Amino acid sequence: MESGAVELKPVDAVEVTVVMDTFVDILMAGADGVQRFKLAYDWSENANLLAEHGFSALLTLELDGARRAVLLDGGLSAKGLRHNLDVMQIDVTNLRAIIISHGHVDHHGGLEGLFQRYGKLRLPLLIHPDAWRDRKIVFPTGLEIHMPPPSRNDLGREGVEITDARSPSLLIDGTVLVSGQVERVTEFEKGFPWQKARTADGGWEPDPWIWDDQNVIIHVRDKGLVVVSSCSHSGAVNVLKNAQRLTGVKQIAAFVGGFHLTGGLFEPIISPTIKAVAGLGVGRVVPAHCTGWRATHELARTLPQAFVQPSVGTVFRFGADVGINA
């Protein structure tokens, strides 16, 4: 470990359960360390998983025989998150914290469903201060899409204990690292220039960098870092290099989450992104949410041994009991 690095305590294993994502395929095959959701005999609407343009993942740590979990994001809709939790029979009463990756509504909107299902959980909730900013995306065509932030008052009424910080945070006895604001070091990952944020006087100003973008880092003993990043507005390569810098650990067992390479604005940086990810030697690459079909196909072609297609309901396990690329 490098001098000055965060003291991130290794765990025996971690399971990353995809609770919400933009893609679901009920017939996908599993693999070593990849468990697909098991269909019920009666797979009607009420027993089938939902997909939507949002992301949510349950991270369950194993250490010394104990299992503890945190929830990263809540997807877009209350119905989606609540429904998938019910279908997957996930018990979140043992949650130790909720983490919001950034302020876009497709990552926090579904938390309402969590509170509807369980009531006041009285959990720590970690969020970056900029996530409270009201935002919109303005496309070159003139189309505007509102990206409302979470409501501090609504979250407070649900009993969560809000901590908003730009700096990294350690959770669960030092085994979970919330990255905080990601250091930007690459030349090609330049944020989201079509985004604007509301000013104090009610106007709008450019807000391309999305400084609130943060991720979760877990160190699996003898395997390396597992990095879960919902959107990677910071840039996936910046996210991975920042995890290495914070922890002093160079080995990356897995990257799970969005690469944000979808659409004409971001497709030009697919090639340098994948080249850099390959150079970092990431063991397992799970491109979710906003990665985009072109980037997903290129990742599968370039990194065939590392690539795994995610689907809602999939559990990815990383630990000593898991073999290839994990």
Image (cartoon, rainbow, N blue to C red):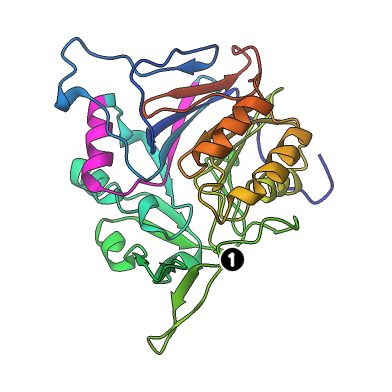
Mark 1: which amino acid? Trp
> On the image, which quarter does residue 26 sit in?
top left
Q: Which quarter of the image is occupied by the N terminus?
A: top right
Q: Which quarter of the image is occupied by the C terminus?
A: top right
Q: Residue at x 32, y 41 (%)?
A: 52
Q: Which residues are magenta?
A: 66-87
- The residue where tag 1 is placed is 209
| CA neighbours of label 1 inside 10 A, class few (<14), some (14 to 19), many (20+) | some
Q: Residue at x 50, y 41 (%)?
A: 292
Q: Is residue 45 left or right of residue 286?
A: left
Q: Position of residue 274 (x, y in %)?
A: 69, 38
Q: Residue furthest bottom?
A: 201
Q: Position of residue 45 (x, y in %)?
A: 16, 26
> On the image, which quarter does residue 167 sit in?
bottom right
Q: Is residue 289 left or right of residue 251?
A: left
Front residue of this view, candidates 142 and 302: 142
